[in-house]
Image: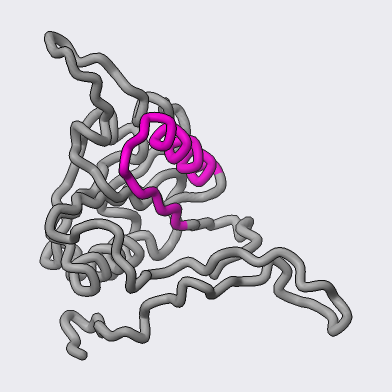
Amino acid sequence: MFTVFGFDVSRQYFIDEDDTVPQKIVLRPDSPRGTHLRRAGPRQRVVFDSNDVVACIVTCGGLCPGLNTVIREIVCGLSYMYGVKKILGIDGGYRGFYARNTIDLDLKTVNDIHKRGGTILGTSRGGHNTTKIVDSNQRHNQDIVETEFLLLGLDQVYIIGGDGSQKGAAVIFQEIRRCGLKVAVAGISKTIDNDIPIID
């Protein structure tokens, strides 16, 4: 175990594959088991080859406290726990995907961003074309069909946002699936309105 920039790397941070969180937190002794959701968090089993992964982080919707801290922790976790070398920030929310506005994120870039307000990636509210982000488009003078994700070389997408942004993340995931792409999408909930019923 070692610590760098205050980030402790040890196996205790990996989530067991069988862990769940109950949908209803408060139960009575005679209550039925009810619905359980798969627990969020880092897994020890890795699907992607860390040396080849291109991950990206995007912040969407309105501002709320702690966005830079979330960005920093994703970058630190991907770097220290999984050895990911290429992490991009999508500048300007969902619109940044098709504008191809990216920022290289590394440990030095995110070292002290948690001390600043807002989001270093910028954000936007509404007005984006979710299907345009992933939808297959014929490129000029080429016979191949590519998507914005393929053009950016993305393998993992971390979407930080509220309920509208998470609905957009679900649409993005469905489109990725329809296109047969091998891209993982992780939605990270954030809210200033306290309107997220379950947070692990």
- Is 116 in front, or is 31? 31
What are the residue bounds of the magenta stretch?
Answer: 164-188
Query: Residue at the bottom extreme?
Result: 1
Q: Quadrant of residue 50?
A: bottom left
> Residue 18: x and y, percent?
52, 73
Query: Residue at the right extreme?
Result: 30
Instruction: Report if residue 81 lies within the magenta region.
Output: no
Q: How many marks?
A: 0
Secondary structure that dominates the magenta span: helix
- Is 21 in front, or is 17? 17
Query: Which residue is depicted at the point 25% across and 82% down?
Result: 9
> Residue 137: x and y, percent?
29, 18
**Where, quadrant-wise, is the N terminus in this rendering?**
bottom left
Query: Residue at the top extreme?
Result: 141
> Residue 184: x and y, percent?
35, 49
Q: How is the image coloured?
A: one colour
Query: Which residue is depicted at the point 19% across and 73% down?
Result: 80
Instruction: Report if residue 175 lies within the magenta region.
Output: yes
> Residue 187: x and y, percent?
45, 53
Q: Is residue 122 left or right of residue 50?
A: right
The relative height of residue 151 versus residue 31 in the rendered view (above or below) is above
The relative height of residue 38 versus residue 104 in the rendered view (above or below) is below
Query: Which residue is depicted at the point 19% across and 32% down?
Result: 151
**Where, quadrant-wise, is the C terminus in this rendering?**
bottom right
- Is 74 in front, or is 176? 176
The relative height of residue 64 versus residue 83 in the rendered view (above or below) is above
Q: Is residue 36 left or right of residue 70?
A: right
Q: Is residue 150 left or right of residue 85?
A: right
Query: Which residue is depicted at the point 71% across and 64% down?
Result: 35
